[in-house]
Image (cartoon, rainbow, N blue to C red):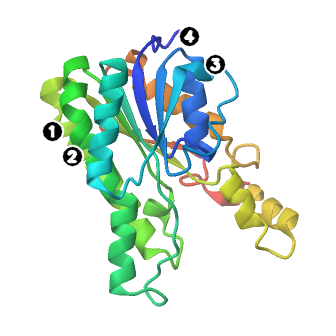
Amino acid sequence: MDLHLNDKVVIVTGGERGIGKAIAQTLVDEGAQVAVVDKLAHASKTLPDRNERAKYFNADLTDSAACRAIVEQVISEWGQLDGLVNNAGFNDSIGLENGSPEKFTQSLTNNTGHYYFMAHYALPHLKKRRGAIVNIGSKTSVTGQGNTSGYVAAKGAILSLTREWAVELLPYSIRVNAVIPAEVATPLYESWLKSFADPQEKLKQVSRKIPLEQRLTKPEEIADAVAFLLSDRSSHTTGQWFFVDGGYTHLDRAIS
């Protein structure tokens, strides 16, 4: 299926590794021009294929001025903006018992603020193109996880903002949706597995709980959903939360 993304300009935050990198690569494969925004973006520039369509921008996204500057640079480079993928963030394990009000507030800022900053500064340009926004969420916001109040609160807010922005931007035909991963095979997830005495046994324990095929989700499977939601193939889809997780969040795990 042709997603009609050829020469569309898309910003992907947190696009240097993991899910963000897979999203950027998929969009490049589909012919889009991709602005990869990351604190690590100056380091490696690692998209393996057709990376002439990707440009890298190093930025601290917790700084609203930096977010504004990124959008300005993208417009200066390409003259348009068709899509925004808000992906950057990390689970910082700020819990109720082991955290503090200061750490909790900082976690919210780190994981939610830049979603608003980037959308705010991108909006005037997205309006001109009837663009689309895709927010990357987390299953923890609907299932809980334990000892991660800040991250869960931030990801819950992101889902609410997805619905709020979808309503606010209806007059401009700007679609806003969220993609929600669960257990995804990323380098960060691999590092987490290595924190256990027997990483392979822990992987088996997790995989057994995923109803569809008892395996982790591939980053590329998240990326495919994002590309579809950015494209005009999803032209009448907005305000939706898409769980790409092999049934992990909603299906009865007793069946696996």
Asked whether the beta carbons under mark 2 and mark 1 sit within 8 Å of each other, the answer is yes
* Residue at mark 1: 168
Label 3 or label 2, whichever comes before in sequence order: 3
**Under tag 3, what secondary structure?**
loop
Label 4 or label 3, whichever comes before in sequence order: 4
- Residue 224 picture quarter: top right
* Residue at mark 2: 164
Q: Which amino acid does label 3 sit on?
A: Arg
**Under tag 2, what secondary structure?**
helix
Asked whether the beta carbons under mark 4 and mark 1 sit within 8 Å of each other, the answer is no
Label 1 or label 3, whichever comes before in sequence order: 3
Query: What is the spatial separation of the Cα atoms under label 2 and label 4, in whole angstroms?
Result: 30 Å
State the residue at coordinates (43%, 67%).
152
Q: Dot 4: few (<14), some (14–19), or many (≥20) neighbours within 10 Å?
A: few
Query: What is the spatial separation of the Cα atoms under label 3 and label 2, in whole angstroms?
Result: 36 Å
Label 4 or label 1, whichever comes before in sequence order: 4
Does residue 123 appear left or right of residue 21 in this picture? left
* Residue at mark 3: 50
- Residue 78 picture quarter: top left
Picture coordinates of residue 88 (x, y %)?
A: 47, 51
* In-front residue for pair 199/212: 199
Q: Which amino acid does label 4 sit on?
A: Met
**Under tag 4, what secondary structure?**
loop
